[in-house]
Structure formats: C-alpha cells, structure tokens
Image: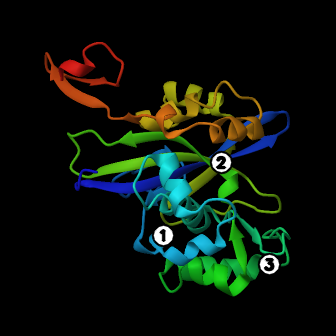
Amino acid sequence: MNNNLTPAATVLVLRDFKDEMEVLMVKRSKKPPFGNLYVFPGGKIDNDDYLKDLENYSDVLDDKNASELLGLDNGGLSYWIACIRECFEEVGILLATKRSGEKLNLEDDEKSKFDSYRKKLVNNEINLLDICMKEDLILSTANIAPLSHWITPNIESRRFDTRFFIAYLPEKQIVQHDGMELTQSLWINPNKAVDMAFKGEMQMIMPTIKNLQSCSEFTVAKDMLDSQKRLKNKDIPPILPKFFKENGNWVGLLPGDDGYEDH
C-alpha cells in the first residue's frame, strides 16, 4: 500500500423500518476535512484497532479471514474493529452482544454504563478491547460486510485508503450523535438521500453518493447484508477517482469512464 495513504473505515448502518430500508447519515461539524457534509460514521484505523487479542472477542472473523476478504496480507480485522469502534464513539451504537448470547440493551438498563464507556473511549482513557474484557462482549463481525473501496485522488494533500462497509442495526440501541464532531444524525432511505444530494438539500461528496446508490437495488437491509457477505475481494475493486483541468474546469473520472486510463 502507498505509504501516503491512511487506512480508514466507514460504515453504513442500515435498518428495516416501515417497509423500507434506511441508512444512518451524520452531518459533520464545520471542522475540516469534511466540514458540514453528510457522511457515514467512520474514521482512520487507530493503533488499538490492530490489537491481536481482539480476535478472541470476534464472533466469526479472525485476522486471516478478514484480510483475505479485503485482499490484504494481514491487518484486515482492524477495519471491522474500526467500524465497530467509530460507530460506538460517534453515534452510540455498539455492534456487539454478550458472550452468553444475550443482546445488549442500550435503550434502558445498560445505557448509563455504556455511555460512560463511550466517553472514556472518545477520551482515549480506554480502548475497545478493555470494554470487551470488562463486559465479556463478542463483537458482531458477522453483522458487517464490505461494500466498496475508495482511494483519495492524488490532488488531495490528505489521502485515505477507505473501505466502506454495511452493518445491520442491532435491537434495543438508539442513535446519539456525539454533538462535537457530528452535529446531526438522521435515518433516511438511500434513494431519498441521493435525491436530496442532487437537489442541493444535503451536501455530500461523490463517494458518499455512489455508496448510497449501491443500496438502491435493495429494499430490505438484511437482504443487502446477505448479498454483500457472499462477495469476494475481487468483486470489490478499488476506486481511485482522477481529477484534471480541461479548458480551465475541473473534470472528474472514475475507473471505466472514457479517458480514465489516459490520465
């Protein structure tokens, strides 16, 4: 991997609600690099996401399987871990169950305890492994599937190697965006979100729109998760947008577009 690329993970949390599929979108604060944009929870992979012992708290994936799914030599599980951690930090959803099989109830009896864990996690006073050990949790990697792979264009100074995933919302969990990095959160049908983006009612960058569009052929979130889980790494090629100036205007091309290979 290019050393200038920062590995990152982003997760589209999906739910089935009133006969349609909805995705969780969040609005970033004015702070760069994604000021005021509607995005999905996510961020760069942290050192603690690579901790080897996390394998003991993963339900179906170990690092070897996860790396194979992403076409990496190693470190693949860290992307699933980052999805789970970022989701918990940013919107308060924890993609995990108790080792006993019992589901977490973050709406009610365990809310304050996990709110406290979340604060400590955000403040780097604790890591996800510590929480798993204290509460004997099993991380729901089976509930998360790769969706796409985007690489930031060469023209940007900060470049990310971002894997997008989908995850299914567990029961008895409520969204609470952090109020600092994120100023708003909403559940919305992916097609409606794309429509609003094109009308200028929700500001989004191209990868966000393209990932929303990839949800359009599904009406049931669980079906989409099952479909994505059947895919192999070769089914999800990396997408590196190319931007160049033509007659004084910026032009953007994606792999497969006419002229892409010439630039």
- In percent of width and height, residue 3 lies at 23, 56
Name the amino acid type tagged 1. Answer: Asp
Label 3: element kind: loop
Q: Earlier in the sequence, mark 3 or mark 2?
A: 3
Q: Quadrant of residue 228?
A: top right
- Relative to 98, 243 lies left or right: left
Residue neighbourhood size for the residue with mark 2, other residues' Cα within 10 Å, grouped as few (<14), some (14–19), many (≥20):
some
* Residue 102 showing in the rendered view: yes
Residue ID for mark 2: 186
Q: Secondary structure at mark 2?
A: strand
Residue 179 x, y percent position in the rendering: 55, 65
Do labels 1 and 3 touch, CB within 8 Å? Answer: no
Q: Residues within 10 Å of mark 1 (few under 14, many from 20)?
A: many
Q: Which residue is mark 1?
A: 49
Contact between marks 3 and 2 (CB within 8 A): the answer is no
Q: Between 105 and 240, which is closer to the camera in this rendering?
A: 240
**Which amino acid is tagged 2?**
Leu
The quadrant holding residue 47 is bottom left
**Mark closer to the chain start, 2 or 1:** 1
Disc 3 designates what residue?
Answer: 110
User: Given the current orientation, which residue lies at the most extreme top position?
Assistant: 258
Find the residue positioned furthest to the left: 247
Q: CA distance from mark 2 to mark 1?
A: 27 Å
